[in-house]
Amino acid sequence: MRSLPLILAVGALAPVLSAQSFTYPDFSSTAGLNTVGLATQAGNLLRLQDNIAPAVGTDNRGGAWYATPVSVSSGFDTTFTFRMHTPSTTGGADGLAFVIQNDQGGNVQQTNPGPNVGAGNTALGRHAAALGYGNFLTSLPGETIDNSLVIELDTFANTSATTWGDPDGNHISIHTGGSGDNGTHESFSIGRVNSAGVGVDMNNGVNHTLRVVYTAGSPGTLEVYLDGVLKLTAPYSFATGGTWIDSSTPVGGLNLIGGTSAHVGFTSAAGSAREFRDILSWTWTSTVPPNINAFCFGDGVDLGHTTPCPCGNVGAAGNGCANSVNPAGANLATTGATATDDVVLVGSGMPATVSCIYLQGDGLDDAVFGDGVRCTGGTLLRLRTKTNVGGASSFPDSVETVTLSQRGGVTVGSGVTRYYQTYYRNSAALFCPPETFNVTNGQVVIW
């Protein structure tokens, strides 16, 4: 299911965020990201790793994830600018990877000293030629970022067929193990282009831009562009998977969050040879299928249902389903910022003088609910019951004695995510046998 609009406290140079898209023109702010291992903010850069030997062992790996899952199953278009430079030895090191994953946890701790492995937006695989997502021949099950699809920018030739099977030291390859462990051995590749096809040294210390476009279908299509030129096309479906090209063996799709969404981000790793791996900018947009009306998320599609809104909403995207007074549906918006603890939920477009309840959940749902669709789930908390004036109300308002975080039992700065939606009474719907209640679209706040 699609995620809901993201509300973060951001400054003028911080990332621009919306329902199913985000933009980091640079990384002067890393709000909304989660870094793992050696990855860090370095000025305006997102630095996955550097060329300095680790204090303990040879483990050198880092990862960075967009903290909130995004929809991938219906398509996406993402572009990032990267630079790999200043190697510790001549020839550079192993490279970096763009990763789409729903790692399920249960990972084992690697024996080589380094950061603990996690799951989801804390996931990290092995170091060196494993590129921060894969494993070694001696690895135990669970050491990879499993349940993943990876675009490798591999800049070191590990050509032995019994270890990695690389075609050369400058190639792009798409790897997946389906819903199981993934791996950097080329037997996991569903599409690859070697150095001649890449056409430029990705490890030459110059800024390069990679664009990945996924078009859903049966199967869908993955396209990889380097510096504006299409380099690689591979058939793939997140539902049914693809085919390993070396063995012509089918491999299954991913087990996505809610059947639609995944964590997205980057990993990088090195061993005895190290270098700086920097991400300079990053944009993401999830595709909205045409001709399906909005109901919940402000992005024009209900991925969890085979039909549009239960009552055929014909209004603008960003609202809930149509109600008795508003064919465009009711809207839930936010004002304020988490940093100043003054976030306010603002409901509008509801019938006048009727009661409504502001809800908080700690998870997502996708359930027909009266004349609408409830997308706030998990453990639900009734924040406050209000009476709409002119079809609108808010929580907290000017007479409240608590903030939204206080009422919701969350701590500002904790990083926890909470989902919000407004339930309201409704006398009649416009397009189907009426229920007596409806809901707005949803909002999400990362505290």
Image (cartoon, rainbow, N blue to C red):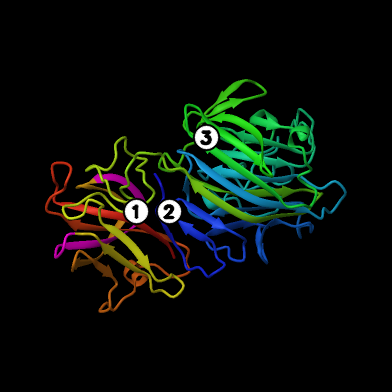
Q: Which residue is under mark 2?
A: 19
State if disc 2 and disc 1 touch (CB < 8 Å).
yes
Where, by quadrant of the figure, is residue 148 drawn? top right
> Is residue 22 at all visible to an observer of this figure?
yes
Q: Which mark is residue 318?
A: 1
Q: Which residue is under mark 3?
A: 179
Q: Is residue 49 left or right of residue 259?
A: right
| Point 47% across, 37% down: residue | 255
Amino acid type of the residue that numbered disc 1 sits on in the rendered structure: Gly
**Whole-Å distance between the Cαs marked 3 and 2?**
27 Å
Q: Which mark is residue 258?
A: none
Amino acid type of the residue that numbered disc 3 sits on in the rendered structure: Ser
| Point 60% across, 48% down: residue | 79
| Point 52% across, 45% down: residue | 105
Which is more N-terminal, label 2 or label 3? 2
Badge 3 density bin: few <14, some 14–19, many ≥20, Cα 10 Å: many
418 over 263 or under it: above or below: below
Considering the whole magenta stretch, tell me its main secondary structure.
strand
Which is more N-terminal, label 1 or label 3? 3
Q: In this view, which residue lies farthest toward the top?
A: 248
Which is more N-terminal, label 2 or label 1? 2
Q: How many marks?
A: 3
Where, by quadrant of the figure, is residue 407 drawn? bottom left
- Residue range highlighted in magenta: 351-368
Residue 100, x across and y down, in percent: 55, 43
Nearest-to-viewer mark from 3 and 2 = 2
Residue 259, x across and y down, in percent: 42, 39
Residue 119, x across and y down, in percent: 53, 48
Amino acid type of the residue that numbered disc 2 sits on in the rendered structure: Ala
Tell me if residue 161 is in the magenta stretch.
no
**Whole-Å distance between the Cαs marked 1 and 2?**
9 Å
